[in-house]
Image: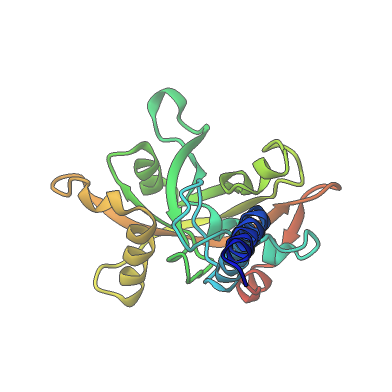
Amino acid sequence: MSKSGDLYSLLGQQYATQENYPTKKCKYFFLGFITTLVLILLGGAAYQLYMSSSKVVTVSNFRLTPGLRWPEPPPHDQVARVARYVVHTSEWGSFATISTASSIKGYPFSSIISISDGPVDKSSGTPYAYITRLDPFGKDLLKDTRASLSVSEAQSDYCQKHDLDPEDPRCARALLTGTVEEIKNGTREAEFAKTAMFSRHPVMQTWPQKNHNWIFVKLKIEHIYVLDYFGGAKEVDVVDYYNAEV
């Protein structure tokens, strides 16, 4: 082949290479885009799988800990389970006592009290509290240990997520009545109460101890009412409450 023919052949090959370059570049771009998209989708699926398989425990008041999330509430017709659910997911409640204050003596008196029925992964069903005798709540109990505790599902994110007002019957409430008992130091229950309260309310460990008369107490439940749907409150047997699946 002549030199001119060789030159023409080389020029032809270079032209063909340049002609195919945009096509290859486009193909590589789409291949990279699809690969990236697949990796994103796989990452999202893996995250969802991790979340669904992670331990489901309760952390209320929107203080969600990474890896932990609220379980879905029980069906509204399983009222004993609903009561246990609302009590366990609540970290505070309204405690009503009979006031001993001179200006309102004999009147119902409600106090906001931090509570816990156990660590986030261990529900006991019994509401515990850490109180001081300097507080009106603590003073009232020295005269009359009867009390009522009201707790609401509105503390979790369920009612907000479903646009339910706290007074909406579908935003479940548990109303527990009984007597408040002081827990004796050195007992197994005292250790459990301490773990229950301090694990859910760690700041309590820093509260001043000297001359403040802090004690652990529990509500000994005698009556339970649950309002979790239309049609009025339902009474729950205490035995059924404690036997309910959490």
* Between 116 and 64, the one nearer to me in the picture: 64
Residue 91 placed where, x, y %? 47, 51
134 or 9, which lies in front? Answer: 9
* Quadrant location, the N terminus: bottom right
Q: Residue at 72% across / 39% down in the picture?
A: 164
Asked whether, in this view, residue 246 is left or right of residue 127, the answer is right
97 lies above or below 68: above
Colour style of the rendered protein structure: rainbow
Quadrant where the C terminus lies? bottom right
In the picture provided, is 142 more to the left or to the right than 1? left
With 203 as the anchor, is 76 left or right in this view? right
Q: Which residue sits furthest right?
A: 231
Pick out the residue farthest to the left. 210
User: Does 170 appear above or below 65?
Assistant: above
* Residue at image location 67% in from the left, 44% down from the top: 161
Residue 223 visible somewhere in the drawing: no
For the image, the number of numbered tags is 0
Position above or below: 109 against 220: above
In depth, the one of 116 and 16 nearer the eye is 16
Residue sitting at 62 percent across and 44 percent down? 154
Residue 120 is at least partly visible in this image: yes
Q: What residue is rendered at 48% in x and 71% in y?
A: 122
Foreground pick, 120 / 126: 120
Q: Position of residue 232 (x, y in %)?
A: 81, 47
- How far across and down, in percent of the image, does residue 198 sit? 32, 58
